[in-house]
Amino acid sequence: MEPDTRSRILDAAEKLLVQHGLDATTLRMITTEAQANLAAVNYHFGSKEALIEAVFRRRLTWLNEQRIAALDAFEAEAGGAPLKPRQIVEAFFGVAIRMAADKGGGQSFMRLLGRTYTEPSDFVRSFLAAEYAEVIARFKAAFFKALPDVPQEEFLWRFHFMMGALSYAISGADALRLLGPIDEPDPDALYARLMSFLIGGLRAPLPTLAPASQAKAAKKPRGKRAA
Amino acid sequence: MEPDTRSRILDAAEKLLVQHGLDATTLRMITTEAQANLAAVNYHFGSKEALIEAVFRRRLTWLNEQRIAALDAFEAEAGGAPLKPRQIVEAFFGVAIRMAADKGGGQSFMRLLGRTYTEPSDFVRSFLAAEYAEVIARFKAAFFKALPDVPQEEFLWRFHFMMGALSYAISGADALRLLGPIDEPDPDALYARLMSFLIGGLRAPLPTLAPASQAKAAKKPRGKRAA
DNA sequence: CGCAGACTGAAACAACTGTTTGAAACCCTT
DNA sequence: AAGGGTTTCAAACAGTTGTTTCAGTCTGCG
């Protein structure tokens, strides 16, 4: 309870946003958890949206700085030569999943982030885009250089799929328990597993795109709204 | 406007839930869109939660029936022999992504489903588990038979990752636009791309799990809460 | 000390949430 | 045509939301 009110609110908000989501988390829940007055949120941050944005920004800028630092290290080591795909994947997704393994707060935040990436909330998406812009540009360039044989559009989709796998890897056991009983996820094992999966998908043979739709759909579902 | 009030509410609710999420969609938005009275929701469904459940159930039971039917067809064709991994992936994920390509409503629903799978809402998760139970059991059995060399826990994680990739594939262009400009997603091309990626990940070499943590983390981030 | 600025506190605000009510309208069978 | 069950409607309900207000308290500096 030592830190100042602003920090306590930030920590409490992060914790509760993970548990309940953006809309279901109320300011009264946050201020109670933070042992602060209700008005303190609007005093220190201006609004609930601004508070949420602050919660994201605090972790996200640091995360993306780490990703770029990791990429810089690999590129310095390579000295102009294209990086190995594994290195680029490590720099982007490895850093993220290691932050997700961090007990000291990063863990819960990453689960929130993965969920929010596809959320239709306008204001979140807008500053997420700004926050991601630089790191995306850097990694796109690195990947295109490392895999010149992969068409750019194809790669973008694969990167998108990889983000999905990462998101689920982090949101983790909660959703996985839907598939069956599972042990507590060992961070190192999770890291190795995701890495193996991602690189397998990234390096998969290019799909054979039938120029005109090959009409593979035997019974294409259409207009099946049940009674 | 022809269909009865109940159906109109169901359609309007599905459409709005996709756009705004579960909590942010209000009954007044739904009933306005459906051109029905506010009380109609509680009259026909009993509560907002029951309405949401009905929205999910309508599409989800059909989707999982299709998955099982596809698996049945492959297994009948194989006649007791293990299926090829590609066939199992096709039966589970191919059916889903084809439903996601369906303009007649399935499209929007699948985007909702992918988002909800990791949502922390209690009541959604509970009936999702029930709705998925049978299909999960069937596909787990088929996969274990097809890939006896893959440890069960390992496979469960890979299946989880695949769900993540599917979810992002479906939520699709909205989030992808964050990575850069992208063309309108051709359903057939998306299908081929995801399939290739999934099988690449599924068949990736097993990760080398250092029995004791190999301390691969050079600078393991720990307790980095920014100021 | 004195007093300005930063912060906290309790209470109230209007707006909106899901739900309930009871009367009106409708539809279909006898 | 009469009646009974089903559906619609406008209005109101109690509860919760984010935000604001304004008096009070604290802190540091002259």
Image (cartoon, coloured by chain):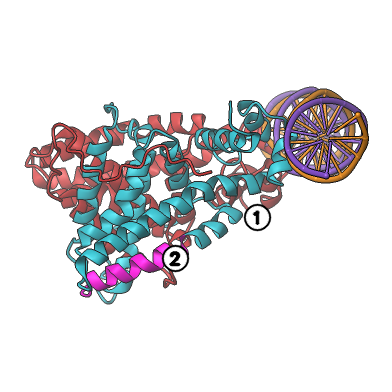
Chain colours: A cyan, B red, C orange, D purple
Give percent across and percent down for residue B189: 31, 67
Q: Amino acid at mark 2?
A: Glu
Q: Who is closer to the viewer here, A17 or B70?
A: A17
Quarter in which the N terminus of chain B is drawn:
bottom right
Magenta stretch containing residue A189, yes or no?
A: no
Highlighted range, magenta: A132-149
Q: Who is closer to the viewer here, C19 or B59?
A: C19
Look at discs 1 and 2 and give the one toward the viewer.
2
Q: Residues within 10 Å of mark 2 (few under 14, many from 20)?
A: few
Q: Which residue was labeled with disc 2? A: A134
- Label 2 sits on a secondary structure element that is helix
Q: Is residue A78 above or below residue A165?
A: below
Please say whether residue B182 is visible from this viewpoint.
yes
Please say whether residue B196 is visible from this viewpoint.
no
Judging from the image, mark 1 belongs to the subunit labelled B
Judging from the image, mark 2 belongs to the subunit labelled A
User: Do the residues marked 1 and 2 share a common chain?
Assistant: no
The residue positioned 50% from the left and 36% from the top of the image is A18
The residue positioned 31% from the left and 63% from the top of the image is A72
Q: Amino acid at mark 1?
A: Met
B128 relative position to A10: left or right: left
The residue positioned 8% from the left and 39% from the top of the image is B149
Q: Which residue was labeled with disc 1? A: B1
**Quarter holding residue A78:** bottom left
Give percent across and percent down for residue D21: 89, 40
Q: Who is closer to the viewer here, B58 or B93?
A: B93
Q: Residue furthest bottom?
A: A211
